[in-house]
Amino acid sequence: MDIRDEFRGDLTTAEVKLKAIQRAIQVTVCGLCAATSLPAVAAETQAGFYVGLGAGQSSFDIEKSELDDVVLDVLFSQGLLVTSGASTFEDSDTALSLFAGYHFNPYIAVEAGYIDLGTAEYRSTGTVNPPGPVVSAPTAVDIDVESTGFTLAALGSLPLGEVVDLHGRLGFLFATTDLSVTARIGSGVGADTEKLDSIGGFFSVGTGFNVGEHWSLSLDWTRYDNVGDEDEDDDPDTQAGFNIDALSVSAMFRF
């Protein structure tokens, strides 16, 4: 065999091998390109409306000692000298929420909702020395603080893969706070309710977990600022409201 024929044979074999390698590289690169493009496809499918339900525990930033001082001051202003007393304050309750929103993409959404932040309950009992011939009379003062409202917020998310994301909300709470007081002195009973409408800001941070294509679960901590303050200025010296913290778990369905 001519050495040139042998060389051409070797060259032909090398070309076949090179073409096979080229095809393998093309398949590999195409696969990588397809895998790289998956997040973009996922981003398109995640755009749309969603609804959700949440439940958790709220905590009212109100001190029992402050309520004790208010009760004592009011009784003293009415000429009632407190001779003995005790009080309790339950500053936490169950919080429930319903919300709906729209995802523009995996990172930005707008959201509106309704939330019931529960009721803080103050109870006090004791005896007072009223003016006149009566030496001592039993007394009790009950105070309930209940807050509900509508929320409007912007939601920012940071996906950490296909399952987990970190997110935060920043928005407004349009709250209605019912302040109910019942007082009993001797055999007399009196009651009054005051409704406070306020607009305050809130923010939250949380973690989401995607469960399938449409469902996700979320754990969130939220701070509602200056609830119950009807004064609309931003001067901290004139703020008469209170803060409410909420830790909640929610389930969301994406359409």
Image (spheres, grey):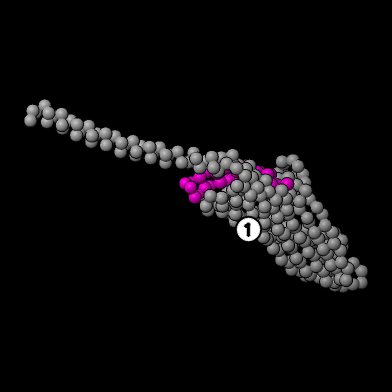
Mostly what secondary structure, the magenta segment?
strand
The residue at the far front in this view is 1
Q: Is residue 21 above or below residue 83?
A: above
Q: In which quarter of the image is residue 153?
A: top right
Query: Where residue 57 appears, x then y in whole percent?
Result: 64, 59
The residue positioned 53% from the left and 49% from the top of the image is 213
* Element marked by disc 1: strand
The residue at the far left in this view is 1
Q: Which of the two residues, 239 or 181, is positioned nearer the viewer here?
A: 181
Query: Where residue 166 appears, x then y in whole percent?
Result: 53, 47
Q: Is residue 43 left or right of residue 196?
A: left
Q: In which quarter of the image is residue 13?
A: top left
The residue positioned 71% from the left and 48% from the top of the image is 150
The residue positioned 52% from the left and 48% from the top of the image is 165
Quarter holding the N terminus? Answer: top left
The residue at the far top in this view is 4
Q: Quadrant of residue 180?
A: bottom right
The residue positioned 84% from the left and 67% from the top of the image is 184
Q: Is residue 202 visible?
A: no
Q: Which of the two residues, 38 or 56, is positioned nearer the viewer here?
A: 38
The residue at the far right in this view is 132
- State yes or no: residue 163 in magenta: yes
Mark 1 crowdedness (10 Å alpha carbons): few <14, some 14-19, many ≥20: some
Residue flagged by tag 1: what amino acid is it? Gly
Query: Where residue 113 appears, x then y in whole percent?
Result: 68, 48
Query: Where residue 4 appears, x then y in whole percent?
Result: 11, 26
Q: Can residue 6 be seen in this view?
A: yes
Q: Is residue 139 left or right of residue 201?
A: right
Say which residue label 1 marks.
Answer: 56
Q: Which of the two residues, 42 or 199, is positioned nearer the viewer here?
A: 42
Q: In this view, does 241 lie to the left or right of 193?
A: left
- State which region is magenta: 151-174
